[in-house]
């Protein structure tokens, strides 16, 4: 698998839920020896500060470092509808994330999915397939090329396992990623997806990226799981 460890596409600043400023996160990228950093704070439909955010990111300059502007957005339902504000300013990419289970009528708390799986009301294979279907829909609806953030980090919270991700589901995910020029990240914070899934996606021609999911400057561009899962 070829993954560029010199680029960290997933970071958060004090603009959303991080501990350090955008400028400090960018500076940390240079300290970590990166050539590219993506600044990608959380947004939702009601977010009003996005134009100012993009302008600030575009104004940053760090010698030897390319700074890219993205945001992290969650999937809302099984169709892959994204929780994005209207009238987006120009972004370089989106991080598409499964913060809650993408139900047919909207987000479902993982604890409720766990109960449904445990009680037998929801088959594990159907739940995993629904996550993949929603992810594919999200990639196709994204207004810019996307990166799937922390793919399958949701599954353990719902009592599910990546073992239920079949070759057919990998085929579908790979097709959606290739068709939209999207990527899947190796997420350092959540240590996902598994090496098996990463190997399967890479073999199907999916571009893989590195994401620290850093919420403080000290964690930018610091890799352990990346080197373990994709040496």
Image (cartoon, grey):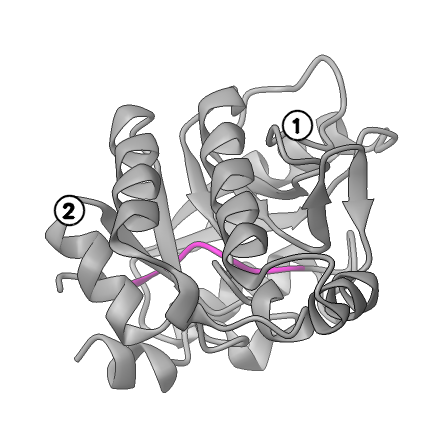
- The N terminus appears in which quarter of the rendering? bottom left
Q: Is residue 19 left or right of residue 34?
A: right
Residue appearing at x 32%, y 56% in the figure: 209
- In the rendered image, the quadrant that contains the C terminus is bottom left
Tell me if residue 88 is in the magenta stretch.
Answer: no
Is residue 63 depicted above or below 225 in this figure?
Answer: above
Instruction: Name the residue beneath numbered marker 2.
Output: 204
Name the secondary structure under disc 1.
Answer: loop
**Is 10 a magenta residue?**
yes
Q: Which residue is drawn at 80% across and 32% down?
A: 105
Decide: is 156 above or below 9: below
Q: Mark 1 points at which residue?
A: 81
Residue nearer the viewer, 61 or 115: 115
On the rendered structure, is 197 left or right of 130? left
Image height check: is 149 above or below 95? below
Q: Residue 166 appears in which quarter of the rendering?
A: bottom left
Question: What kind of element bears circle 2?
Answer: loop
- The residue segment tinted magenta is 7-12
């Amino acid at each position: 698998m070829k993954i560029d460890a010199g680029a960290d596409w997933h970071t958060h600043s004090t603009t959303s839920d991080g501990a350090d400023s955008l400028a400090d996160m960018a500076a940390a990228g240079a300290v970590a020896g990166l050539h590219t950093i993506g600044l990608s704070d959380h947004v939702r439909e009601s977010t009003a500060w996005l134009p100012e955010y993009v302008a600030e990111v575009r104004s940053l300059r760090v010698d030897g470092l390319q700074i890219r502007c993205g945001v992290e957005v969650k999937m809302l339902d099984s169709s892959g509808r994204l929780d994005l504000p209207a009238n987006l300013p120009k972004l370089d990419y989106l991080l598409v994330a499964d913060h809650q289970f993408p139900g047919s009528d909207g987000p479902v708390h993982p604890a409720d999915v766990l109960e449904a799986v445990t009680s037998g009301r929801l088959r594990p294979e159907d739940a995993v397939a629904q996550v993949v279907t929603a992810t594919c829909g999200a990639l196709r609806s994204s207004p810019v090329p996307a990166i799937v953030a922390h793919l399958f980090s949701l599954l353990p919270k719902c009592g599910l396992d990546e073992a239920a991700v079949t070759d057919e589901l990998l085929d579908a995910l790979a097709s959606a990623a290739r068709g939209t020029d999207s990527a899947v990240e190796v997420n350092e914070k959540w240590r996902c997806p598994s090496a098996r899934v990463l190997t399967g996606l890479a073999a199907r021609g999916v571009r893989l990226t590195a994401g620290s999911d850093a919420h403080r400057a000290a964690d930018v561009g610091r890799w352990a799981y990346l080197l373990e899962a994709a040496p």
